[in-house]
Amino acid sequence: MYLNIRYIGCFALMALTVMMFTATPSFAQLNNRPGPYPFQDINRPDDERIDNLLDLLTLEEKIRLLSTDLGVPRLGIRSTGHSEGLHGMALGGPGGWGGREMKDGKWVPVTYPTTTFPQAYGLGATWDPGLLEKVADIEATEVRYYTQNPALNKGGMVMRAPNADLARDPRWGRTEESFGEDAFLTAKMTVAFVKGLQGKDPRYWKSASLMKHFLANSNEDGRDSTSSDYDERLFREYYSYPFYKGITEGGSMAFMASYNAWNGIPMTIHPILKEITREEWGNKGIICTDGGALRLLITAHKAFPALTEGAAAVVKATVGQFLDDYFLAINQAIVNGILSEMEIDEAIRGNLYVALRLGLLDGPEAYARQPYVQIGVTDTSKPWEKQEVKDFVRLVTAKSVVLLKNTAVQPSEKPLLPLDAKKIRKVAVIGPRADEVIMDWYSGTPPYTVSVLQGIKNALGPDVEVFYEPSNTMDKAVIAAKKADVALVCIGNHPYGTDARWFYSPVPSDGREAVDRKAISLEQEDLAKLVNQANPNTVLVLVSSFPFAINWSQEHIPSIVHLTNNSQELGNGLADVLFGKVNPAGRTTQTWVRDITDLPRIMDYNIRNGRTYQYFKGQPLYPFGYGLSYTQFTYSDLSFSSRSFSDQVIVSIKVKNTGKYDGEEVVQLYVNYPGSKVERPDMQLKGFARVFIPAGESRTVSILLKAEDLSYWDTGKHAFVAEKGKIRIMAGSSSADIRLNDVISLL
């Protein structure tokens, strides 16, 4: 029965809410579809199919589609919703995404294993878009497996990933979710992740990428009521750029609006959602609220007197999915005449487009021929149990490691790393991060984990004595370090602060969702001081989701490596680097400052006031793009396919591995604009390539430089403009290590 909402009383509406949002048929329960309907005909144009479906839907069904569920049971459209997926599909873990089940008369948390990669911050440190595309493809396979397997039916094929926000300030509590501070690098990584999630089929998506959080959501404290204020050029050239590329190049047709306002207007109702992201960029898909954002429009932003007005405004902004209790407010808005069915149609049209691209609208015969429908159904091998997947996670983890420092203990010796396993008889593994792999707020539950301690044991075998001490209680860490040939001190942050209470972190330098960091120093560095004093052959292993001001360690400890939390292969991946099986080539994706006073106010969103490598005037601890190798590379022969160009030019650099180890170099291409008539940064990343070069050999690295990537936003013309004139090309190993430069002309 389908009732006319206008004539339903309050209690009946509440009952209807329960009816509409429960007992939705699963993939397995909808084997026989009604029809045929025109919307099921794959030979019709997409818009025609969606128009037909909108005509068939009742008003009640349209209102139901304002949720995250894409299903319409009456018409045989299978249900699917959202899953989290920043670095692996999340079905359980600290966020509790797996839900609860009744066991022995009690509701208990239930988790399901999924492949778990390093945090997004670590994935960014690989500087390898191709690698990220494969990471996302594995994630999408597991999404399909869980949603389509009739025995599981968990999660949803709309993936809340990647996070395209920019990490403009290391105090931001969700820095771990971002690929870094640079718009160009983050855009490249975002596009790759989107493509991996959605797959290569021209008609169907493997899963749908829903990017987070549009826009400029990089303060947690007060995020529900604060305004991120900056000008139009920064909107176009910086904050929105990864989202823009994620849509126009990656093909994402979905994103989540952030809690904050931009220049005083809450993002959940901002006109740019429709005017720019839909009408200009071409987002034909989902725009959803963040969790509870409707209520926060009233209670935090004070934008409307009641939920009814707020809900109507959200829909009118073409937001088609609520992550709130919206049902009564939407119905009241219809009854009050402030929201029309046509406006609901416009908002949910994007939901139906995503359903179409996921194959949910096809008739039975076409559905059976889709490329991904066998995953979890006829192909029931568990992806997370495959050895090639486990090996790949290990490789990604190793590739994410950044070698921050590597010197000799004595002047006459070689650098401490890589360690020679044949010469080590005793090793001390010390510190609070040594024997745990901690999941973050958006992690799933990995099928297994390998801690640093276990990874070292795996690498050295049973004949090497391993001492483990989590702290220096009763001088135990110092004693262990003195007995060892080499000491590894493992310190860093806890991804959710050891306490899952909301809006709370017991350690000032920790941060996560809803909590910004209040410090960037690391109190655990005192443990490193004591270990290094006891044993000069000390390696600092910084396992962290953020940059830290480890100034003492940089000055005194011979070798320092950084990697992020969460990887199920954390210990094995790290050991591969420490013992030279993998030559590290990870690079920083943020400017690591020396002191918290080097940072502008956290609510200052004008990055020109000293943020990121583009505008920071101080001396960083580690610059953007920085990372060492066990070998050395020389650069020569900077050349161009043309000395002047109007569309694109190929920049070539000869890179030689002059050291003793095979290795990868991350060649980075920066530009500036001599004589520019508009304000431009002194340096901008505009190309990069991670390249493997055997010891003693050379490779010519060619990077395509596009004129459109050199453009700035002309506020008068309301368009990106490639300014004619001189372009200085700078090639190097980091933003602070430029090896070659030359000037060419943009015509």
Image (spheres, rainbow, N blue to C red):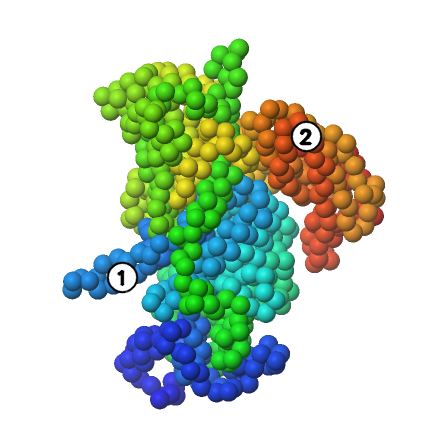
Q: Nearer the viewer, residue 127 or 113?
A: 113
Please provide percent x and percent y for residue 464. Answer: 34, 24
Please provide percent x and percent y for residue 659. Answer: 62, 24
Q: Nearer the viewer, residue 60 or 104?
A: 104
Q: Is residue 91 left or right of residue 474?
A: right
Pointer 2 residue:
697
Q: Residue at x 63, y 53 (%)?
A: 236
Q: Is residue 225 above or below residue 19?
A: above
Q: Which disc is residue 288 wearing?
A: none
Please provide percent x and percent y for residue 286. Answer: 51, 67
Which of the two discs, 1 and 2, labels the residue nearer the N terminus? Answer: 1
Instruction: Sort mark 2 into few (<14), some (14-19) or many (20+) by Cα contacts within 10 Å.
Output: few
Amino acid type of the residue that numbered disc 1 sits on in the rendered structure: Arg
- Does the image show residue 397? yes
- Identify the image quadrant of the N terminus: bottom left
Pointer 1 residue:
100
